[in-house]
Image (cartoon, coloured by chain):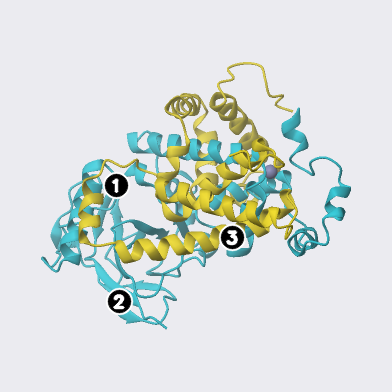
Chain colours: A yellow, B cyan
Amino acid sequence: MGSTSDLESEELERLRAGLQMMALRALGDPEAAEEVAQETLTRVVRAVRAGRVKWGECLGGFVRGIARHVIADVFRARKRSTGLEAVAERANAAQPDDPLTILILAEEQQRVGRALSQLAEGDREILHLSFFAGLTPAEIAERLDEPVSRIRKRKSRALERLRRAFHGDAGAGHDPG
Amino acid sequence: MEMLEQVTIRGDPRDIYRNLEDPACLEWVLNQPLTCEEITNRALIERYLAGLLGETEAEALESHYLFCGRCQDELRLAIAVRGALAEVEAVGSQPPPLEGVNAADERHAPAESVRVLPIRRQRVSRRAVVTAAAALAAVLAGLIVLRPSDVGRAPVHRAETPAAEAELTLQLPAGEVATVEEFRWSPAPGANLYKVTVYDEAGAVVLEVETLETHVAPPDTTVFAPGIRFLWQVAARVGWDRWVSSELAQFRISEP
Ligand SMILES: [Zn+2]
């Protein structure tokens, strides 16, 4: 602590959050993700201090490269320690369903769920095709035989409602543009 | 609003050029990094979470969101949306997408015949997870030989499956292999959709893919590390909400 005074702590925290997302997605384990974030940050800050790189978002690729290394290390270490006990333990553990949902507060999830249930079925369908099938608006448009512009509009409108719900913003707030 | 400022270039754009002596920064500039708008337009976050981004796009996206608060928010929103969608689906109030849209056109749609599913554990009941994991543990321990009905009630499976219909046989990969170019299995009578699930040694799902074919190539974002034993299984949908499952098969990538 304190040693990062020249780096804005807000920026560091943002980077830490990003690293946690990345590691959680790769490893599925919150504890390991935190470990990766911490180790990566330490290495990055060290590199900045040593003058090897300059702090800023153009470090994205650099930081990601470090994080990938750290993730690979953790992965290897876990592989060594993974035994049948771990499997059995995991079978009994009450872990959350999707590891990434740990990043979401219960009330955020509930609000989004409620907002989703209020959307038109067709809009939910578009979201489903986007978020689960990973289709782009153009692909969805082709599939549903509708103009892309329409799909794009419906998707962004539906998402905007969910976004407001997510941020606990019932009415005003973000300009839907 | 400050959120909007940091999405492009925070502060003085000339900062970038000031940093050009940094190889990493130079590379960043040359690579024309993504903007938030581009990420939205190309549905990169959605595809990322669905496991559909290639390495190049994933790298660009991750390099971006590490430093972008707005895109981190969008990622969290996307995770919540996926969770909510999965919940809606689990309740069963929404037909699976393949029925929902132009079902008649689905039969021959090569470009869209493969869908990589997110690792969507929301749809799996807790009991199913425990059962599958316990079964995996037993297999790994060499305790039992699995029969189709033992595990792998596919996550979406709700109806009972007559064991007689489980004719699915896994073909490739099997045993020790150098790489996994594709997964291949025998067709199940009447199947209109297949779902492939791959587990690692710890029983975690590393890949879930749906396809209309009887073979599928893993996306290049999925890495099968050498030396680790993987188990895989195919479930075939043979009717509305009726699935039959293959046995579990093992493979292992030989160590270099
Ligand atoms: Zn962004």
Q: Which one is in front in this view, the residue at disc 2 or the one at disc 1?
A: 2
* Image-quarter location of ligand 1: top right
The answer for which chain carries disc 2 is B
Q: Is residue A151 above or below residue A52?
A: above
What is the C-alpha distance between the residues marked 2 and 1? 25 Å
B143 vs A166, left or right, is: left
Q: Are marks 1 and 3 in contact (CB under 8 Å)?
A: no
The answer for which chain carries disc 3 is A
B19 vs B235, left or right, is: right
* Residue underneath mark 3: A66
For the point 83% across and 62% down, the residue is B21
Does the rendering let one see residue A143?
A: no
Residue B171 is tagged as: 2
Q: Which one is in front in this view, the residue at disc 2 or the one at disc 3?
A: 3
Q: Is residue A24 above or below residue B199?
A: above
A58 vs B244, left or right, is: right
Residue A130 versus residue A168: which sits nearer the camera?
A168
B211 vs A165, left or right, is: left
For the point 72% across and 24% down, the residue is A175
> Do discs 2 and 3 share a chain?
no
Q: Amino acid at mark 1?
A: Asp
* Residue underneath mark 1: B241
Mark 2 residue element: strand
Mark 3 residue element: helix
Figure quadrant of the C terminus of chain A: top right
